[in-house]
Image: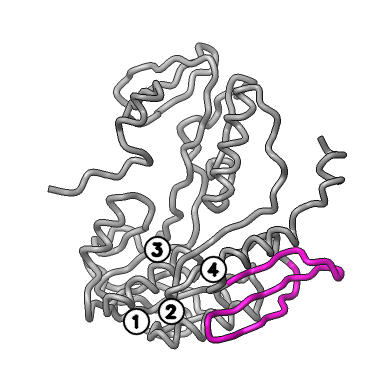
Amino acid sequence: MPAEPPWLRPLDWYADHEVVLLPGVAERLDTARRAVVLADGERVRYDELVIATGSEPVRLPALAGFENVQALRTHADSARLRAAVSSGARLAVVGGGLIGLEVASAARLVGAEVTVIEAAPQLLPRLGPEVGARLAALHRAEGTRLHLGAPLERAEGSGRLSALVLADGTRIEADHVVEAIGVRPASGWFAGAALDHHVDVTGDVTGGGHREAAARQGAGVARALLGLPPAPPAPPSFWSDQLGMRLHCVGDPAGARAELTVDAAGFEAVYRRAGVVSAVLLAGRSAADLRAARRRLSPAPELVRSAA
């Protein structure tokens, strides 16, 4: 029997806090009658509605229909991947972003043969070529094969995928494939609805981001509904566990040049734009280092007071 999908909190917590869990699939939003219509026809009425339906993985047409190709988004996806990945299994990961690299790192730990395919010329382009090259070197040192700057051309196989062929002619045989090329908002169920002031939309359904951003947005909506003042502004951030260490980025690294410091424990990248620190990326660093990085990016107290 498959394991029960994990809840965020123990089920007793919801009852104790007067939260009613109503499992179901939202199919349509009727703002005129202030109701969410579920797939079974039930109508859930509301005074105030928060939409936090997240995102869904982008899938490649070339990989559609193969039984051994999957995305990684749900608890069922994770159980399927765990069952498919074992020592000696040939796993291909299409996409060298955070999810793809986390999958590659975890699969190497159990002895799978892992190949990552990334259409861009480097891993995680937003973090810059210095960090991309460092991460590539670390993943290769763990035994992961990387194919960078070589988009997927086609897939071979019938029923089950047997090989991927890249634009440069490289052929990669695989037992299992994970698609990790990105996500898009899971907003189709309320497309066309005229959203009004009774509806708040938050998290990945607003257009993507990391789970830290989604949690912060959700907390902001909750404070607004409760009539509380906004929390103090904080720099954007994201984190990723791979290669036996945590990567944590605070600030916005896009378009800034990274100054890299490497040691045996990991590395640190400081990003500057026009001479001002715009982001800090920590890899294998302590909680104290992270707090110090946040202080470098947080607005000065007088600026927070003037914006209030």
Task: Find residue 179 and name its label.
Answer: 3
Q: Is residue 39 left or right of residue 180?
A: left
Q: CA distance from mark 4 to mark 1?
A: 29 Å
278 part of magenta stretch: yes
Determine contact: label 2, label 1, CB under 8 Å: yes
Rate crowding at label 1 as few (under 14), some (14 to 19) or many (20 or more) other CA atoms within 10 Å. some
Q: CA distance from mark 2 to mark 1?
A: 8 Å
Residue at 48%, 23% in the rendered image: 29
Dot 3 or dot 4: first in sequence order is 3
Q: CA distance from mark 3 to mark 2?
A: 15 Å
Task: Give the percent coordinates (x, y) of residue 180.
Answer: 44, 63
Q: Main secondary structure of the magenta part?
A: strand
Q: Quadrant of residue 298?
A: bottom right
Residue at 42%, 60% in the rendered image: 60
Label 3 or label 1, whichever lies nearer to me, is 3
Query: Mark 4 = which residue?
Result: 247
Label 3 or label 4, whichever lies nearer to me, is 4
Task: Find residue 166 and name its label.
Answer: 2
Q: Is residue 99 left or right of residue 272?
A: left
State the extent of the magenta-drawn residues as a range.
Answer: 255-282
